[in-house]
Structures are given as structure tokens and as C-alpha cells.
Image (cartoon, rainbow, N blue to C red):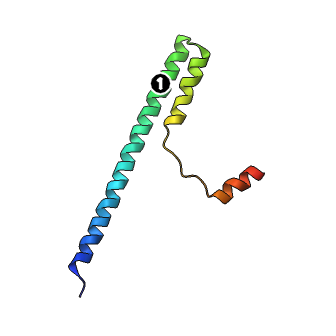
Amino acid sequence: MADPKEGEGAWRALRIRSGAVARLHKEIGLYEAEAAKEAAKAARMRAEGACPHDVKQQARAPRCVAPPQASPPRRTRCRARAR
């Protein structure tokens, strides 16, 4: 007969993992909202005729805000550089 505590452990693990997914979903939404806000600010600066350097730096900001992507395996990166 199965131990009842095994079922509790599985539920706990599932709850932890689903919480992590919910947190990541929320973070991605926040990143996207912030990127849209920064892009709108850069467009507004362009329309107002701000200094080109300031506009360039502002346009670059959303790339810094984007969530990190999983990096490819090291072997793949090294092959890409060798080409």
C-alpha cells in the first residue's frame, strides 16, 4: 500500500512548480509592459526632435530590459564564432 505522505510530496512539488510558472508569467508581462513604455518614450523623443544621442540611448533601453534568453550550449556558441 502506498504511503499517504508520497501523495502530499507530489502535490507540494506541483504547487511549487506551478507557483514558479505563475511568477515567470508575471515577470514576462512586466518586462513587456516596461519595454513598450520605453519604446513609446523613444518615439516621443524622436517626434520632439531630441538630441540624436539621447534618442539612440533611449531606443537601446528596451533591449536591456528584455528577459534573459537561455543561452545555447557552449559547443554551439563556439562553432558559431569559428565560422
Task: Give neighbour class at mark 1: few <14, some 14-19, many 20+ (Cα, 10 Å).
Answer: some
Image location of residue 48, percent across then percent down: 52, 11
Residue 83 screen position, x and y as percent:
78, 51
Above or below residue 83? Residue 65 is: above
Image label count? 1
**Callout 1 amino acid:** Ala
Task: Report the side of 3 relative to 70 (left or right).
Answer: left
- Say which residue appears at 47% left-offset and 24% top-offset: 40
Residue 58: x percent and y percent? 53, 24
| In this view, 42 is above or below 48 | below
Q: Residue furthest right?
A: 83
Task: Write down the residue under mark 1.
Answer: 40
Residue 37 relative to residue 4: left or right = right
Residue at coordinates 51% horizontally, 32% vertically from top-left? 62
* In-image side of 33 versus 69 (left or right): left
Which residue is at a point 57% across and 24% down the rendered structure image?
57
Residue 65 horizontal/vertical position (percent) = 49, 36
From the image, which quarter does the N terminus lie in?
A: bottom left
Q: Which residue ends up furthest to the bottom in the rendered image?
A: 1
Question: Please, what secondary structure does the residue beneath circle 1 have?
Answer: helix
Occupied quadrant, residue 14:
bottom left
Spot the residue most to the top.
49
Decide: is 70 above or below 30: below
Q: Residue at x 77, y 52 (%)?
A: 82
